[in-house]
Image (cartoon, rainbow, N blue to C red):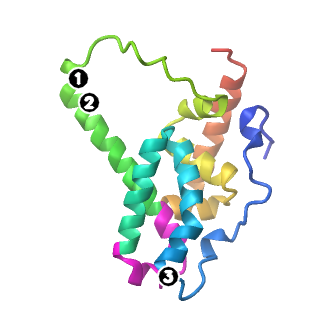
Amino acid sequence: MRAMNGPLHALPNDDVDRDHARAVSVGATFEEFFLDERSRLFGMLIIVTGNRAEAEEVVQDAFLKVWERWDRVAAMDEPVGFLYRTAFNLYRKRLRRAAVAIRKAVDLLPDVDELRDVETKDEAVRLLGRLTPRERAAIVVTAYLGYSSEEAGRLLGIRAQTVRVLTSRARASLRAVEGDPS
């Protein structure tokens, strides 16, 4: 796999613990699990969503769902995978709901959104924003978090081949955009 140039190559992945999904010790309490995983999940969701507030809400909702089922989740082989899958499912559900709301209210929206360009974001977030949510999730889980295609597939609830295709497409899009000054 060819190394990326530009702002995304600086994302930390050299020191990622590839066995992190299996690192929850037997008998860990929910509080220990929460403390171990919250920052990591939150950081990943900020990148995927592009919005700290939305990322925080998804994190809270995901941990609530895990807490409600903690007796079953703690007994799983990969409770971290369940957490990430839950978070991604919640995020996709939010996207679908937003799309439905937009379709219903499309006649109420103004033709020009004057505040669209007010918020500036750093270059990596803008580049990731050009990707589809699935491509963004695949590239973040593999490049940023350092999971293999197989591990990422389990975390995202898709096949490893789909992860490889999405990652390849995302990298190609990012390479094409990095030379674009807009």
Q: Position of residue 51 (x, y in %)?
A: 48, 39
Label 1 – label 3 distance at C-alpha: 46 Å
Q: Quadrant of the C terminus?
A: top right
Query: Mark 3 or 2 closer to N-term?
Result: 3
Q: Residue at x 45, y 56 (%)?
A: 59
Residue 82: in magenta span: yes
Label 3 – label 2 distance at C-alpha: 41 Å
In the rendered image, the vertical position of residue 145 relative to residue 168, given as above or below: below
Closer to the eye: label 3 or 2: 3
Q: What numbered label is drawn on residue 106?
A: 1
Residue 80: in magenta span: yes
Local SS, label 2: helix
Q: Is residue 34 left or right of residue 91?
A: right
User: Label 1 is placed on what type of residue?
Assistant: Val
In front here: 181 or 119? 119
Q: Position of residue 65 (x, y in %)?
A: 36, 67
Q: Label 2 belongs to which residue?
A: 102
